[in-house]
Image: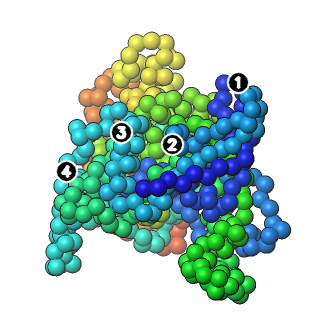
């Protein structure tokens, strides 16, 4: 395949002697689109990709198209890019020591690549980043599942056969009403997730599985294969990755393309055709001539950890994005080694990591009762999933031992337990109080096992994990009296109230299990507590009066189950 080389006058800047250089230049928006990829955080066939940009917002693109339609309008802030292939991007100085020079970018017509070629190139790129990737990490059960889906789709009666497929992982776009139904992407946050185990291996498995599907078909090309489209994969192949500015780029490109629809544009195309040009070439030339030049700041660094670091800093220091999406992006974009390389720099930039790192594990680990039940901030999230910030708040109670205050009281029992009984806790090793708490509160510290066991018992005793949309459903906030911020917080705070008032220091995990049994009064606390109609029509669960009443109801009943189940749940 022939290669295309683009060259630009450029200026090289070193902000510090230690920093990687920045190259400043301008280029046509249409040209930038040809060599810059936008790796979006999205779901393909319900599997998360490894990109870090938010999915495009059509409304923002439309607004920018209108802005760019006026040739007098100017955007001053540059697009932010970084290297994805350092062999294809080179800067040559005009003279030794001069900051001026020429930037050369080599690319291909990536849209003409076959699906097989795209998949194999991305697989090779991931393998170059993560040395552990290979045959031994591929989930063969997942590969077999994709192969079965492919075989069923190939059968004439596949529409009926699909009924037998487990669709538990399918996307749901139902607009379910809930007091926890949305994530505010404009909400400022200092939180970002660095997962202990990233999603790169899963993404790698999905790619390898689709290579096998193509091999089974005996085909090299397809526009789409089990939810993976060529257009979505293009971003991973281009020599430059766009870290910030995808909406500006798309708006400028679309504005240029609109020019062929105007009367003046149609007349120019007609004149070009009369002169012997093909209509397609005439339209392409007109778009190029109408495409505005955009400023670009290109970081000459091909490290994925640096790309994500720049993305996080831009989006948290300038335009904050939702906690869930930001956390999902970082956790699933880097390998463990890449994460460790950037973690300290993120902390020094004022971005908290540990709570979100903890949440990352709980939303993905198979042993977690919250696996797959928390919003990620991506398109395709069910509206009735638990909010990211809710789970983070629950994590703080156990990990940081603070925030365990019943809504109807003033005492923080998690903090009180930490001060009086944590020094005797046998779940951590010997050392000073500071050292012991540091061990406890590590993202993978003893608190996590306690957290998982506690909420697993809550789910198993009170909840219905099969039918989520019931009064005691586990997995949907739409109607559940149990699976929501208020009830889960009340239960966690009350458990620490129990530990404190009963002078429990948790000698080991067996001792923890005993305390859970004692907390539930040996099973005398009814499993149907939440599985009743609480008559909450038009009641918002997060109202202070509601939270206080629910906390009081629960505490009084749990301490004296013989008193009978409470009858009033709204003030």
Q: Nearer the viewer, mark 2 or mark 1?
A: 2
Residues at discs 3 and 1 in contact (Cβ within 8 Å): no
Among numbered discs 3 and 1, the one appearing first in the sequence: 1
- What residue is shown with label 2? 85
Q: Dot 2 lies on which element?
A: loop
> Whole-Å distance between the Cαs marked 2 and 4?
33 Å
> How packed is label 3: few (under 14 Cα within 10 Å), some, or many (20 or more)?
some
Q: Image point 69% across, 55% down: which residue?
A: 27
Where 75 falls versus 189 (above or below)? below
Quick one: 277 or 149, which is closer to the camera? Answer: 277
Measuring 56% from the left and 63% from the top, which residue is drawn there? 56
Can you give x and y, in whole percent of width and height, for residue 488 in the image?
43, 50
Q: Which mark is residue 17?
A: 1
Residue 162: quarter of image: bottom left
Q: Secondary structure at mark 4?
A: helix
Mark closer to the observer (1, 4): 1
Quadrant in the picture for the N terminus: bottom left
Do the residues under discs 2 and 4 have CB atoms within 8 angstroms? no
Name the residue: 41% across, 18% down: 424
């Amino acid at each position: 395949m022939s290669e295309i080389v683009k060259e630009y006058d450029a200026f090289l800047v070193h902000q510090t002697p230690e920093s990687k250089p920045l190259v400043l230049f301008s280029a046509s928006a249409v040209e930038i689109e040809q060599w810059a990829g936008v790796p979006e955080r999205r779901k393909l066939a319900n599997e998360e990709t490894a990109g870090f940009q938010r999915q495009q917002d059509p409304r923002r693109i439309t607004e920018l198209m209108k802005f760019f339609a006026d040739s007098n309008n100017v955007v001053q802030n540059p697009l932010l890019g970084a290297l994805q292939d350092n062999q294809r991007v080179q800067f040559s100085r005009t003279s030794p020591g001069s900051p001026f020079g020429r930037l050369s970018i080599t690319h291909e017509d990536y849209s003409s690549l076959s699906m097989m070629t795209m998949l194999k190139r991305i697989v090779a790129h991931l393998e170059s980043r993560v040395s552990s990737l290979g045959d031994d990490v591929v989930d063969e059960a997942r590969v077999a599942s994709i192969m079965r889906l492919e075989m069923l789709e190939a059968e004439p009666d596949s529409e009926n056969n699909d009924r037998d497929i487990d669709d538990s992982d399918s996307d749901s776009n139902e607009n379910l009403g809930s007091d926890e139904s949305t994530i505010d992407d404009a909400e400022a946050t200092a939180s970002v997730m660095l997962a202990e185990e990233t999603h790169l291996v899963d993404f790698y498995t999905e790619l390898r599985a689709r290579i096998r599907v193509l091999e089974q078909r005996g085909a090299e090309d397809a526009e789409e294969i089990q939810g993976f489209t060529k257009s979505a994969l293009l971003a991973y192949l281009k020599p430059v990755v766009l870290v910030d500015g995808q909406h500006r780029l798309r708006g400028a490109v679309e504005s240029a393309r609109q020019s062929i629809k105007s009367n003046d544009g149609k007349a120019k195309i007609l004149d070009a055709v009369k002169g012997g040009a093909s209509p397609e070439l005439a339209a392409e030339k007109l778009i190029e001539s109408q495409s505005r030049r955009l400023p670009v700041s290109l970081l000459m660094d091909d490290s994925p950890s640096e790309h994500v670091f720049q993305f996080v800093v831009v989006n948290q220091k300038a335009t904050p994005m939702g906690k869930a999406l930001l956390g999902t992006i970082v956790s699933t974009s880097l390998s463990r080694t890449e994460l460790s390389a950037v973690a300290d720099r993120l902390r020094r930039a004022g971005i908290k990591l540990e709570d979100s790192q903890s949440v990352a594990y709980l939303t993905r680990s198979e042993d977690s009762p919250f696996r797959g039940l928390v919003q990620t901030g991506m398109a395709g999230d069910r509206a009735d999933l638990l909010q990211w910030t809710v789970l983070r708040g629950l994590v703080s109670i156990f990990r940081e031992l603070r925030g365990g205050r019943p809504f109807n009281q003033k005492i923080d029992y998690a903090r009180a337990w930490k001060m009086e009984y944590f020094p005797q806790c046998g779940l951590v090793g010997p050392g000073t109080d500071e050292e012991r708490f540091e061990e406890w509160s590590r993202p993978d510290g003893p608190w996590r096992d306690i957290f998982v066991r506690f909420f697993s018992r809550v789910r198993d005793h009170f909840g219905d994990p099969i039918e989520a949309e019931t009064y005691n459903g586990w997995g949907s906030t739409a109607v559940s009296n149990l699976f929501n911020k208020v009830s889960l917080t009340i239960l966690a705070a009350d458990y620490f109230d129990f530990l404190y008032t009963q002078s429990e220091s948790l000698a080991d995990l067996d001792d923890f299990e005993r305390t859970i049994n004692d907390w539930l009064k040996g099973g005398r606390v009814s499993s149907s507590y939440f599985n009743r109609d609480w008559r909450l029509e038009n009641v918002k669960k997060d109202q202070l009066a509601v939270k206080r009443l629910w906390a009081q109801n629960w505490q009084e009943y749990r301490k004296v189950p013989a008193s009978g189940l409470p009858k009033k749940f709204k003030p």
